[in-house]
Image: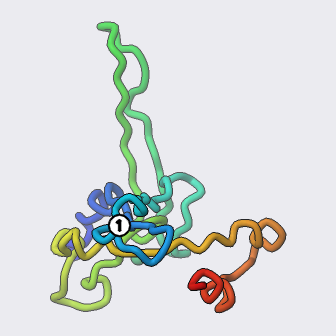
Amino acid sequence: MMKHFFRIPLLLGFSIILNACSGPDTLTENPEKSRTVDLTHDFSENTVYWVTAQEFELDTVFEGKTEKGYYYSAFNFSTAEHGGTHVDAPIHFAEGTQTVDEIPVEKLMGKAIKIDVSKKSLFDPDYQITVGDLTAWEK
Ligand SMILES: [Zn+2]
């Protein structure tokens, strides 16, 4: 259990990255049509957590000019590990399985496509992607 607790800093520093392609080409097949996208959301008082989880807390250690004239910025933070952008390692629900640091980083990246439904979402904030959106993209 304690081992899992110490995964928190790793999860917060982790970025979910995917290769968004403008078409069915992959990064290796057509790198000029691919790009890397960081999908991580900032941790803040607005981060969504499980109802029983500790919410994000940020304390300023120091921020500003020091007495010696140089700028210094440092913070302490605490939060539940299962909130906001994070990875649920297999050990989360299966004893004896991988922790986050044991997952090869290559397993955390992959091919993806981008289906833009932002215009539809402007008029319906609860818009959910449809089969029609997928078939339209395929065409
Ligand atoms: Zn989780």
Q: Quadrant of the N terminus?
A: bottom left
Left or right of 104, for residue 8:
right
**Where is residue 71 shown, x and y percent of the image?**
36, 18
**Where is residue 97 shown, x and y percent of the image?**
18, 87
Asked if the beta carbon under badge 1 is closer than 8 A to the nearest atom of ligand 1, the reply is no
**Where is residue 29 shown, x and y percent of the image?**
31, 71
Identified at 31% across, 89% down, the residue is: 93
Identified at 16% across, 74% down, the residue is: 102
Residue that sits furthest to the right in the current view: 123
**Where is residue 12 shown, x and y percent of the image?**
35, 58
In the image, 54 versus 26, the foreground residue is 26
Left or right of 133, for residue 2:
left
Q: Which residue is mark 1?
A: 30
Q: Quadrant of the C terminus?
A: bottom right
Left or right of 76, for residue 46:
right
Secondary structure under the numbered disc 1 in the rendered image: loop
In the image, 105 versus 138, the foreground residue is 138
In the image, 42 versus 115, the foreground residue is 115
Identified at 35% across, 77% down, the residue is: 88
Establish if 40 lies above or below 21.
above
Q: Quadrant of residue 135?
A: bottom right
Three-letter amino acid code of the residue under disc 1: Asn
